[in-house]
């Protein structure tokens, strides 16, 4: 078992290092252009990656309890028992994991519903952490500008939504390839969280700069 975990774990670890390095490179240039971005990046990247990791674990656990590695199982769409003479497999089914599309987040799949809840939780979390960061950075003298809050929350939603779509896809792909998602999925998801989070936050600061805004009153316009 240990050798299998090591064999399956090396590829995602190396790949995640490369992806995280790319995210770090983007962050390096972003901070040069927007110095005030620096304190917000760890929160953006960490929170989004953690939420997506929770979803990834839920998907993997459901797959392990519902099917055989290598074959993506389906669950019946209808909760009613089969009709007389009909086999369970004759009922219309849907993949246990949602499709890796943004549209799938709004579907009836149980995991898509959980994803919407977790994505919704990212909003109050973002508001709380941004407020704390601004209070610390301003010496307790200011609160975030409303425009900055809107931009930051939009960046957070974009990052978390993209990560959930990716987690749905990577778990299904690993399962079909007979690779245990428990051993390989989370490094991919969290490293992409760094990359997408940094890119989303940078895009937010670019937009804030274009609008002539600042993270908090008294801060230099970005």
Image (cartoon, rainbow, N blue to C red):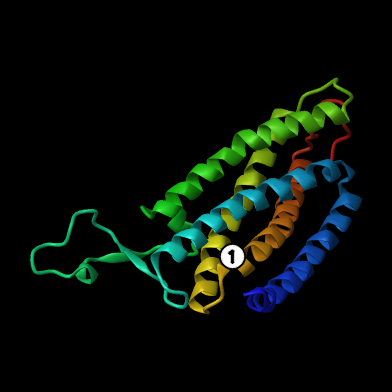
Quarter of the image that includes the N terminus: bottom right
Considering only vertical position in the picture, is 140 above or below 204?
Answer: above
Quarter of the image that includes the C terminus: top right
> What residue is drawn where x is 43% and y is 48%?
113
| Percent x, y of residue 194 | 74, 56
Answer whether residue 54 is visible to the viewer in this image: yes
Location of residue 137 (image quadrant): top right
Answer whether residue 97 is visible to the viewer in this image: no
134 displayed left or right of 93 = right
- Give neighbour class at mark 1: few <14, some 14-19, many 20+ (Cα, 10 Å): many
Which residue does the numbered mark 1 point to in the structure image? Answer: 182
21 displayed left or right of 169 = right
| Percent x, y of residue 54 | 58, 51
In-front residue for pair 166/84: 84
Location of residue 126 (image quadrant): top right
Location of residue 37 (image quadrant): top right
> What residue is drawn where x is 65% and y is 76%?
8
In-front residue for pair 110/145: 110
């Amino acid at each position: 078992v240990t050798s299998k975990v090591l064999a399956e774990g090396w590829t995602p670890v190396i790949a995640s290092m490369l992806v995280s390095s790319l995210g770090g490179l983007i962050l390096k240039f972003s901070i040069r252009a927007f110095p005030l971005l620096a304190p917000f990046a760890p929160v953006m990247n960490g929170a989004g990656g953690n939420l997506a990791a929770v979803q990834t674990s839920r998907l993997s656990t459901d797959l392990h309890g519902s099917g055989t590695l290598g074959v993506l199982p389906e669950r019946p769409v209808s909760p009613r028992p089969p009709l007389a003479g009909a086999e369970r497999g004759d009922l219309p089914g849907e993949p246990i994991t949602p499709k890796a599309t943004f549209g799938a987040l709004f579907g009836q799949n149980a995991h898509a519903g959980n994803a919407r809840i977790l994505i919704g939780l990212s909003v109050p979390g973002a508001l709380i952490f941004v407020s704390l960061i601004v209070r610390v950075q301003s010496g307790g003298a200011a609160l975030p500008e409303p425009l900055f809050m809107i931009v930051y929350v939009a960046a957070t939603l974009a990052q978390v939504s993209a990560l959930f779509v990716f987690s749905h896809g990577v778990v299904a792909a690993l399962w079909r390839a007979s690779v245990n998602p428990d051993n390989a999925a989370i490094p991919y998801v969290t490293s992409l969280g760094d990359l997408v989070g940094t890119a989303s936050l940078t895009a937010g600061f670019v937009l804030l700069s274009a609008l002539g805004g600042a993270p908090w009153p008294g801060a230099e316009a970005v």
